[in-house]
Amino acid sequence: MTLNEVTKFMKTRSLLFGFVAGTLVAGAAVLLSAPSSGRELRDRIKFSKDEALDILLEIKARAAELKNDTVYATKASKETINQFITEVKARIEYWRLEIEPHKNEISSQIQEIESAVGELEGIVASSPITQKMENKDQNNQ
């Protein structure tokens, strides 16, 4: 049973409880206000009582059914959530394994770039043009 079905059933149950309460109050009001003999009144009360008991038994049966459906929905939801969590963990692990070679490749490329930049800095620092520029800067100060 889905959550929507459970919600619909609960609304129906509330409506049914209201109907039963209204029926009992209306029945009692009609029985007590209608002119009739004592025997007739007792028969009407007994009939109304039997109807009310039948309705209450139906409500009890539906409440038990709702309880069973709720327990089933809870178990099904728990299983679905556990399955979802397991699947997400597996996908994350697969993703980690899939990116590992790329991660290592990127790290080695970064090291190569850093090494190349270091070499370029050394070349630039030792070039005659750089030395001339440094000498000019020192003379201007």
Image: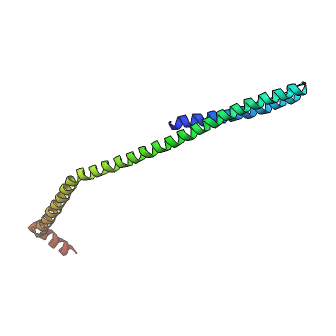
Where residue 74 appears, as percent x and y from the top left, is: 50, 44
Q: Residue at x 16, y 71 (%)?
A: 134
Q: Please name the colour scheme applied to the rendered image.
A: rainbow
Q: Which residue is at a point 15% across and 64% down the rendered structure image? A: 115
Q: Nearer the viewer, residue 94 or 59?
A: 59
Q: Nearer the viewer, residue 26 or 65?
A: 65
Q: Seen in the image, is 19 located left or right of residue 105? A: right
Q: Quadrant of the C terminus?
A: bottom left
- The answer to whether residue 15 shows anywhere in this view is no
Residue at the location (74% across, 35% down)? 21
Residue 43 in which image quadrant = top right
Q: Residue furthest front?
A: 39
65 sits to left or right of 102: right
Q: How many marks?
A: 0
Taking depth in this image into account, of 33 and 6 the one nearest to the observer is: 33
Residue 102 in sight:
yes
Q: Position of residue 23 (x, y in %)?
A: 75, 30
Residue furthest to the left in view is 128
Image check: 109 left or right of 94?
left
* Residue 28 x/y as whole percent: 82, 31
Q: Position of residue 111 (x, y in %)?
A: 17, 62
Left or right: where does residue 98 sit relative to residue 79? Answer: left
Q: Nearer the viewer, residue 119 or 109?
A: 109
In the rendered image of this protein, does residue 113 appear above or below residue 18? below
Can you tell which quarter of the image residue 49 is in? Answer: top right
